[in-house]
Amino acid sequence: MEKPQRWPEKPPQKTTIAKAIGTGKEFWITSGKSNIGLITFARKISSIMARLLTGIQSSGEQHLGNLLGALAPAIELSQQPGNDAFYFIADLHSLTTLRDGEQRRHNTRAAAAAWLSAGFDYQKNTFYRQSDLAGLVNELTWYLGCFAPYPMLANAHSFKDKSDRLSDVNAGLFYYPVLMAADILLYDANFVPVGKDQKQHLEITRDMAQALNNSCGEELLVMPEPLIREEVMTIPGTDGRKMSKSYGNTINIFGPAKTLKKQVMGIITDSTPLESPKNPDTCNVVTLYKLVATKNQIAEMEANYRKGGYGYGHAKKELLGVLTEKYGEMRENYARWMERPDDLEDILKMGAEKARPIAQAVLARVRGKLGFN
Ligand code: ADP
Ligand code: TRP
């Protein structure tokens, strides 16, 4: 069996070593500070060709939490020389929660436009929609599912958290981690950048790969390493809880100016009067400002808070100003992409054709070994 030749001859100096279990080879990765200033992530530094893979569901429009917590760090990783990024829109996964086809089509376009306007280079990398390769990924899903012990899936948080109201839970939700494992293993991915919430899914992926490899007596599937963004802070929403589509507290950084303004001006604050001094350390507006403003801007706002005579309305306007300035170009590009659905479609289709032969080769290895040819 041919393995991708993406391994280095010798290690670069002083780094963290992540073993690519099952290959007997090693990757060398090291930590680096991201230029958005709050994320430390594993960074590949040698000339090793490492395949990164990640997916984002098309279950809604992307918000500031998604941008800072998922898109920006993944894009930054894809820009490291030698990295080969497979980033895709997990539209099949979104069916576990979203039934409306038109809405999914819109969300898929919106996710594609978000990745592209945030700077993902679709020409250098591979950018596709999961369902364009539905036949291949679902085939591997079936094989892997037959190696997944039932209790392992029943214990997945994504299922277990909802198992107290099983009548609302569809079997797709139960099978979600198997499809996710197939997404990863189908493309010989080495590293999977994800948020902390996906850690268990990566463990399940590795367990299933190991089970299939053990059973076949061969390293048929490449063992992926999670790149967990442990240090990404949880971006708060307009009500102070985690920013999330499901809480309706998002800042739709890609959306129209009017919506953005409404959301920023609607950030919940306390009722300290304008003239009184305020505590910047407990204010949601300042927390968000700190994520996007420069050091000087932050220091100035903090001083204004402490001094008094500076209202929350002023602070929100400042925040809105920084957001529109910092992300102005991205927002314009997003709006332009959204007006070109046919081009988005072509880009995703082109990405799928780039990904297809890799998936076919992996499936051929698995099929042959399992006796399906
Ligand atoms: P939502 O909670 O809005 O449904 P998703 O679960 O679709 O968001 O998020 C996709 C990824 O975006 C997550 O795995 C996580 O890495 C990142 N993300 C989402 N919300 C936040 C947030 N508030 N802070 C940091 N990262 C976030
Ligand atoms: N489950 C992931 C999320 O909700 C999305 C996803 C689907 C994914 N397939 C994947 C992430 C494969 C990484 C790799 O965030």
Image (spheres, grey):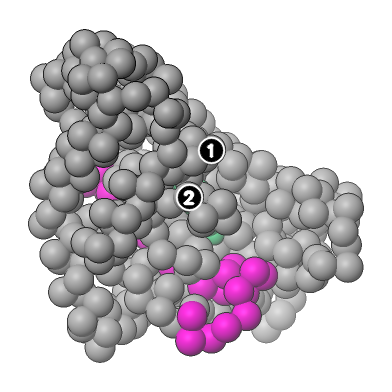
- Please tell me which residue is depicted at 18% across the width and 37% down the height of the picture: 318
Residue position for label 1: 241
One can see residue 115 in this view: no
Q: Camera-side residue: 217 or 211? A: 211
Reply yes or no: does residue 140 show up in magenta.
Answer: no
Where residue 314 sits, quadrant-wise, is top left
- Please tell me which residue is depicted at 80% across the width and 54% down the height of the picture: 162
Q: Is residue 58 left or right of residue 331?
A: right
Residue position for label 2: 249
Amino acid type shown at disc 1: Arg
Where residue 331 sits, quadrant-wise, is bottom left
Location of residue 188 with respect to 17 vertically, above or below: below
Location of residue 223 with respect to 337 vertically, above or below: above
Bounds of the magenta segment: 74-103
Could you say where residue 254 lies in the image, as x and y percent from the top left? Answer: 28, 60
Labels 1 and 2: the sequence-earlier one: 1
